[in-house]
Image (cartoon, helix red, strand yellow):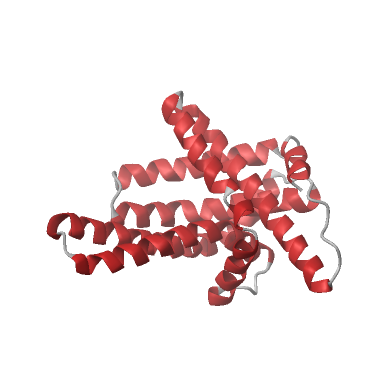
Amino acid sequence: MLRRVLRGAWPSLPALAVAGAAVCAAGTVAVLLAPGVTPVSVLVAAVLTGPWLAALTAAADRIAADGEAGLCDWGRGLRALWRFGAAQTLVPAVPAAAFLAALALWQQSQSVWLLPSLAAGGACAVAGLLALPAALSLGAARPGLRGRLLWICAAHLVARRPTRFLAAPSLALLGLWASLRWTASLLLLVPPLVALVAAAATATALAHHAMATAGGEEPDRG
């Protein structure tokens, strides 16, 4: 599946380039509005980047399904999913903001009563970030799947194949490190690559789940 997605990246390059630039632009605006790593900055970044992430995810999913996505596909995804994207990115952002707020209080007071809040907020934020690509993909493909059921399905996919879904955040961290180490222009490549890897992971997980449910053999891992 990953090979198929990467083969479809070249004919879909205009859509991926515009989508990646839009995500980076939204992130830049978020940094300008709320600099630093604070609860407010996390929430602002989630709201501003969420719509563009959802549109990019929809384009990557189309590449995984059909082998190609154009600018029109990306535009339709943006119009249809901008509210959905902003809402879903808040799911991991809210516990992340709570974690940062509890961390700031703990650094001031060193109170042991804040440790459960730190642990819960951090765990929920990490779990939400891991499940976010699957939630965006499932929600983009199934408009009727929303709310708690959407995240239960996404968490189920991630729990069945956790290592597969670690590839996208690992690639994002690597791209961020490379952009800080060498040149910031590499950031433009990070969102499309991460979206393609996440789309391949979700599509493969769905295929394996469908085959397991039907009682058949697992599909080819390629």
Residue drawn at (55%, 61%), measured in percent from left and top? Answer: 131
The location of residue 137, given as percent across then percent down, is: 64, 59
Q: Nearer the viewer, residue 127 or 144?
A: 127
Q: Nearer the viewer, residue 19 or 129?
A: 129
Residue drawn at (45%, 33%), measured in percent from left and top? Answer: 177
The location of residue 104, given as percent across then percent down, is: 21, 56
Compared with residue 8, is residue 43 higher up or lower down, i.e. above or below? below
The answer to whether residue 22 is seen in the rendering is no
Instruction: State how many labels appear.
Output: 0
The location of residue 88, given as percent across then percent down, is: 50, 63
Extreme-left residue of the structure: 109
The answer to whether residue 87 is seen in the rendering is yes
Compared with residue 222, is residue 123 higher up or lower down, i.e. above or below? below
Residue drawn at (59%, 39%), measured in percent from left and top? Answer: 18
Compared with residue 91, is residue 53 higher up or lower down, i.e. above or below? above
- 108 left or right of 45? left
- 54 left or right of 199? left
The location of residue 194, given as percent across then percent down, is: 59, 44
Locate residue 196: give its quadrant.
top right
Residue drawn at (48%, 61%), measured in percent from left and top? Answer: 127
Q: Nearer the viewer, residue 80 or 67?
A: 67
Extreme-top residue of the structure: 182
Locate residue 143: give its quadrant.
bottom right
Extreme-right residue of the structure: 216
